[in-house]
Image (cartoon, rainbow, N blue to C red):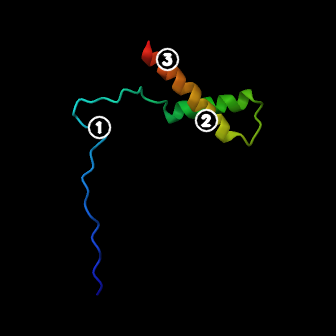
């Protein structure tokens, strides 16, 4: 019977540590917000297929900029 190699155990810090250090970036848009905005862009463009990634990236850009503006005010 062959022995299995053990995977080394590595300590990983949780992204939600309680050290008091907060991420200075505002939270990003939710997936639902992204989905809805990407669909709106698709409709505004005349429902032309084949540009789903472009619509998604445009939605992400618009929503992220909007959140940053609100966060900085």
Q: Earlier in the sequence, mark 3 or mark 2?
A: 2
Q: Which residue is mark 3?
A: 69
Q: Earlier in the sequence, mark 1 or mark 2?
A: 1
Query: Residue shown at 67%/37% (left/top)?
Result: 54
Residue 48 at x, y percent in the picture: 77, 37
Please tell me which residue lies in front, 72 or 39.
72
Whether 44 is drawn above or below 71: the answer is below
3 vs 1, front mark: 3
Q: Earlier in the sequence, mark 3 or mark 1?
A: 1
Residue 60 at x, y percent in the picture: 56, 32
Q: Which numbered disc covers residue 16? A: 1
Residue 50 at x, y percent in the picture: 74, 43
Query: Residue shown at 67%/40% (left/top)?
Result: 52
Q: Which numbered disc covers residue 57? A: 2
Q: Dot 2: within a 10 Å radius of its alpha carbon, few (fewer than 14), some, or many (20 or more) residues?
A: few
Query: Residue shown at 55%/26% (left/top)?
Result: 63
């Amino acid at each position: 019977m062959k022995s299995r190699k053990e995977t080394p155990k590595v300590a990983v810090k949780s992204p939600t540590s309680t050290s008091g250090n907060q991420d200075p970036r505002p939270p990003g848009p939710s997936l639902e917000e992204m989905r809805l905005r990407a669909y709106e862009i698709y409709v505004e463009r005349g429902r032309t297929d084949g540009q789903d990634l472009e619509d998604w990236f445009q939605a992400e850009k618009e929503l992220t900029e909007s959140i940053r503006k609100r966060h900085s005010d």
